[in-house]
Image (spheres, rainbow, N blue to C red):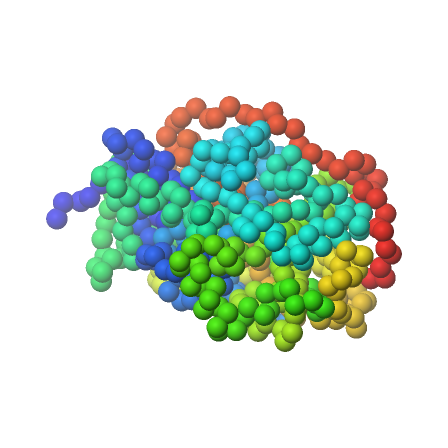
Amino acid sequence: MATQKYDYIIIGAGSAGCVLANRLSEDPATSVLVLEFGGSDRSVVIQMPSAFSIPMNTKKYNWRYETEPEPYLNGRRIHCPRGKVLGGSSSINGLVYIRGHAYDFDEWESLGAQGWGYRNCLPYFKRAEHYEEGGDGYRGSTGPLHTTNGNHMKNPLYGAWVEAGAEAGYIKTEDCNGFMQEGFGAMHMTVKNGVRCSTANAYLRPAMGRPNLTVITHAMTRQIILEGKRAVGVVYDHEGQTHQVHCNREVLISSGPIGSPHLLQRSGIGPAKVLRKAGISVRHDLPGVGENLQDHAEVYIQFGCKEPVTLNSKMDPLSKLMIGLRWLLFKDGLGATNHFEAGGFIRSGKSLRWPDIQFHFLPAAMRYDGNKPIKGHGFMVLTGPNKPKSRGYVRVRSADPYEHPEIQFNYLQREEDREGFRRCIRLTREIIGQPAMDRFRDGEIAPGPQVNTDEEIDAFVRENLESTYHPCGSCRMGEDDMAVVDSELRVRGIAGLRVIDSSVFPTEPNGNLNAPTIMLAERASDLVRGRSMLPASDAPVGLVEDWENSQRSTLPGRNVRV
């Protein structure tokens, strides 16, 4: 059998891989192969926005990674879901569309990611997006990725939450993805006409009819084929057989913050000590592969609700059936939203230029996996520090691609992160204690009024912290010796090989990761094609007045003992 050759081989049809597949195949003279271990995303539980907890916790669509016992979380193992399906994690995530703060990207640039400042990234956010409210200097109106506010905060709890934030002394923001991130207001989601707008729906499916694009599902990439210090193809398993395929130009790894370092290491690219321990021959000693792993984490702060307006009354089987039927028939109603329709971004202290705490507000009290709703009515705030200092790693165990790597985040390793959670809990209590919530608030369920001291809060966090499912950083971009890829996402020391996904982020953006991952892939597609970059933006960045001297804009209307 003749050896197959493509111009580009993309490994992973996830948030980044689908973008690359679409953009690179726009040129009919360019042949593109996509290898994806998962299968079809044609499932109601994927496409219906409110059902996201189901695929997130289903073996069929989720790699179901789990950490090693986390030393600062009482030895608990933490669930680390990653999408194993067309669309990757964009097909199983909570659909939240948050770009991060402008200064997050300037921070990347200051850490060595040349050309990745906000002025360079904003044009690619805009190119990707079709915002339902229309475009402006910050938002896109013609891109493949549709964004919306779901049901536009019809539930009265959303408005009360935003008002409570204002009463606590913070500003309201018209658009947290626009001029001013800081403040309380609507949150956006990747939904089009009531259906999940994953990258599979937005980017891959429109390109599938192109004769120059080949997508192979249920294909496990074993390793990159190297000739000396050049990537020339890949070895993959499909339908019980092992295949080789070669490329004319480049291999593009888009397997995510766990999968990408794992593949590099299986291919002999990574820290020599780690590779030798796993019995893998060292082809290229690159010490940063798998290091610098970081993640957002959160706790649930839950309250009872006096009025029967929460989603807790919709958790019974009959209500779920009716929601599902309405969605199937009309693509609207409670099935057409992720229910995270309002949130907020604040600074935890004065002298911080941009926010470091994010709130997701949910008009229900339950576990994130959709299980165990409380009896009666309740609501909750999901929160945690958005700029974590703790760092972990991803390390290969063997050359077997089906054996999960060793994953350790080291949550709460750093005192800054522990203090961050204390502030999150106390500031949330203060917000919920404002007059706007009096009509609804009916006692704190978790952590509970008995949890007050630093020690008590720390104990609660250690036992209840969960991942927000935003891992990144394990193939860091930069120009120093610990960087894995350079500023054009080329693996340092290996020709013909790039990593393009959230693993290259130097630090966590101040928000959910799907939007910046899509932006990264949009910009990367121009780098790969050797195209001129989109002109840099000069859009101004909003900062709260007197941020140097004050944690919030005004004193809270009601002093709440926290």
Query: Which residue is drawn at the image coordinates 58% and 60% (left, top)?
Result: 467
Query: Which residue is drawn at the image coordinates 58% and 29% (left, top)?
Result: 137
> Which residue is nearer to you in this view: 55 or 490?
55
In x, y percent, where is residue 543?
A: 72, 35
- Residue 370 position (above or below residue 234): below
> Which residue is nearer to you in this view: 511 or 336?
336
- Residue 17 position (above or below residue 462): above
Q: Which quadrant holds the C terminus?
A: bottom right
In x, y percent, where is residue 284?
A: 41, 46
In x, y percent, where is residue 170?
A: 77, 46
- Residue 559 position (above or below residue 288): below
Q: Is residue 164 left or right of residue 491?
A: right
In x, y percent, where is residue 465?
A: 63, 65
Q: Quadrant of residue 365?
A: bottom right
Query: Which residue is drawn at the image coordinates 38% and 48% (left, top)?
Result: 200
Q: Residue furthest bottom?
A: 375
Query: Which residue is drawn at the image coordinates 72% and 47% (left, top)?
Result: 346
* Residue 479 seen by the camera: no
